[in-house]
Image (cartoon, rainbow, N blue to C red):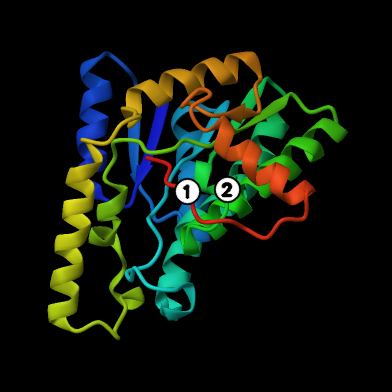
Amino acid sequence: MHVVMADVEAAALNEAVKEVEAQGGQVQGVPTDVSSAEQVDALANAAVASFGAVHLLCNNAGVWGGTRSGHIWEHSLQDWEWTLGVNLWGVVHGIRAFLPLMLEHGEEAHVVNTASLAGLISGRGIYGATKHAVVSLSESLYHDLASIEAKVGVSVLCPGLVDTQIFLARRNRPEELRDRSLSVEEGARLGQREQALSDRLRGLPDVLLPGEVADQVLDAVRDKQFWILPHGQRFDGVLRERFEGILDRRNPGPQIGIG
């Protein structure tokens, strides 16, 4: 496959492009802020200009929501705008910009939207709210495409913890969406906590490598599988408890760790 990569972080994008090139792949990197409709439109135009048609779309950008570890009402408006902009609007812009092109060429194609296990269980603050929305959006997309007998499949990816730098996402947070209620000292302490959390991630059980998740995504695309839960049955008990609680009309219980 020819590959078009998009990332808001130019250095990371360049490194990823070099990695694919080193393996003999044809690849193009397009710096993109997925919260911007105009930049995602430009990404779609660049993909078509370079390779002619898009057959696999992965809406994968995500940030760990907010800057504070307190209650959901304590998050700033900027926290909400930043997290919704990337996690939800990024998917919306991807679908809006690419789906018409994928339907137009009429060949088999597929969309993968990255949600999270947080989109299937209770809580998780701003991040969980965005991921629940991505799950619902993906289900709607699946039904809409089926209703017109389109040759475009849909999958929603719902992993638990994966060894990425998502807890350090604030490094790419736009200045205009910075939480101005934080003092310099508070910001420094927050950065230390985020780094410690990211470091600790690698020592937790059931943490998957990105390549392990990617292999499962590719298998799911080939099998036209909608739900992708790459941790196998590890969290089936958590999911069952949530949905049985809904059917039993029980109030939400304590949040359960997914690491």
Q: Amino acid at mark 2?
A: Ile
Q: Relative to residue 121, is residue 213 depicted above or below?
A: above
Q: Residue at x 69, y 20 (%)?
A: 107
| Residue 98 as seen in the image, left or right of residue 71 | right
Horizontal relation, residue 16 to residue 215: left or right: left
Label 2 sits on residue? 121
The residue identified by callout 1 is 256
Circle 1: element type: loop
**Could you say where residue 156 lies in the image, as x and y percent from the top left?**
59, 35
Which comes before the other along the chain, label 1 or label 2? 2
**Which residue appears at 20% of the width and 18% of the height?**
22
* Comparing labels 1 and 2, the label whose residue is closer to the camera: 1
Residue farthest to the right, as pictured:
147
Pick whichever, 75 or 36, lies toward us.
75
Instruction: Classify mark 2: helix, strand or loop.
Output: loop
Q: What residue is drawn where x is 33% and y is 71%?
A: 68
The crowd level at tag 2 (other Cα within 10 Å; few <14, some 14-19, many 20+) is many
| Quarter-of-image position of residue 172 | bottom left
Residue 151 is drawn in which quadrant?
Answer: top right
Residue 98: % across, % down: 60, 41
Q: Quadrant of residue 106?
A: top right
Image coordinates of residue 93 in percent, x first then y, are: 57, 53
Say which amino acid is labelled 1. Answer: Ile
